[in-house]
């Protein structure tokens, strides 16, 4: 697992993960950026899938992106923490890595799902993301590299701290 800072749409990896909505429609945030960079074929491919429940993931080609695939994961909207948000967020990471493994993909990059428009507290999200991805990687050895692509330096620091804490666990 590795942390990088920057724009996920520019990464040369097998798959980038989109922080999608349940309709898999082009939205704002990282989702809007991915759709703009991939071109309109991406929205068409997403429309054919017809939606995705919270916590699950779906795969499409990457079209004009450097990444060969986009894995669309629908994060939870934050409602205060007692509505299954933690489990749904962890499921996004787990299901995206399982899908990468099924498709023989070796590298996958995640944005900080749910921490923008969906309002999930970012520190809590970083801890959950690293733990869920770490566990999923152990189960899916074909996936060799997970990158947490953080948009700004505060987010990158948060993820570095979460990763250091995770690695210290027995
Ligand atoms: N590269 C990497 N990270 C980015 C980028 C980028 N180019 N742009 C933003 N981020 P958000 P959500 C970070 O709001 O909370 C959309 O409309 C951003 O700083 O994109 O899961 C969807 O269609 C933040 O840390 O996703 C849904 O309707 C993180 O990406 C809804 O928003 C996630 O922020 C999903 O909301």
Image: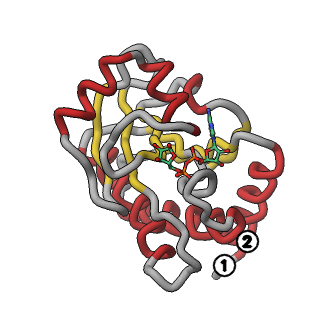
**Quarter of the rendered image showing ligand 1:** top right
Q: Is residue 79 above or below residue 142?
A: below
Residue 124 appears at what percent x and percent y? Answer: 66, 71
Mark 2 vs ligand 1: CB below 8 Å: no
The foreground one among 98 and 29 is 29
- At x 53% / y 24%, what residue is drawn? 12
Determine whether, in the image, residue 50 is placed left or right of residue 112. left
Mark 1 neighbour class, 10 Å CA radius: few under 14, some 14 to 19, many 20 or more: few
Q: Is residue 23 left or right of residue 156?
A: left
Instruction: Name the residue at 61% across, 61% down.
Output: 119
Disc 1 residue lies near ligand 1 with CB under 8 A: no
Label 1: which secondary element: loop
* Residue occupying the far bottom of the picture: 82
Category of crowding for the residue at label 2, using alpha-carbon neighbours closer than 10 angstroms: few (below 14), some (14–19), many (at least 20): few
Q: Quadrant of residue 91?
A: bottom left
Query: Residue 166 at x, y = what percent?
Result: 66, 70
Q: CA distance from mark 2 to mark 1?
A: 7 Å
Labels 2 and 1 touching (C-beta < 8 A): yes
Residue tagged 2: 165
The residue mark sitting in front, 2 or 1, is 2
Residue occupying image coordinates x 35% and y 47%: 142
Residue drawn at x 77%, y 59% is: 158
| Left or right: residue 53 compared with residue 30 | left
Judging depth in this view, the residue of 45 and 106 nearest the camera is 45
- Residue pointed to by mark 1: 169
List x then y, in percent, for residue 5: 73, 38
Numbered disc 2: secondary structure = helix
């Amino acid at each position: 697992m590795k942390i990088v800072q920057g724009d996920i749409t520019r990464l040369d990896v097998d798959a980038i993960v989109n922080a999608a909505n349940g309709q898999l429609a082009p939205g704002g945030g990282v989702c809007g950026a991915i759709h703009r960079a991939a071109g309109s074929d991406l929205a068409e491919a997403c429309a054919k899938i017809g939606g995705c429940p919270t916590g699950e993931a779906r795969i499409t080609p990457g079209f004009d992106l450097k990444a060969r695939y986009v894995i669309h994961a629908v994060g939870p909207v934050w409602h205060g923490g007692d509505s299954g948000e933690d489990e749904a967020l962890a499921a996004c990471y787990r299901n995206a890595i399982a899908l990468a493994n099924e498709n023989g993909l070796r590298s996958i990059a995640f944005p900080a799902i749910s921490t923008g428009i969906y309002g999930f507290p970012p520190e809590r999200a970083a801890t959950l993301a690293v733990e869920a991805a770490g566990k999923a990687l152990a189960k899916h050895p074909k996936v060799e590299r997970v990158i947490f692509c953080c948009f700004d330096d505060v987010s990158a620091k948060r993820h570095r701290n979460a990763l250091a804490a995770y690695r210290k666990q027995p």
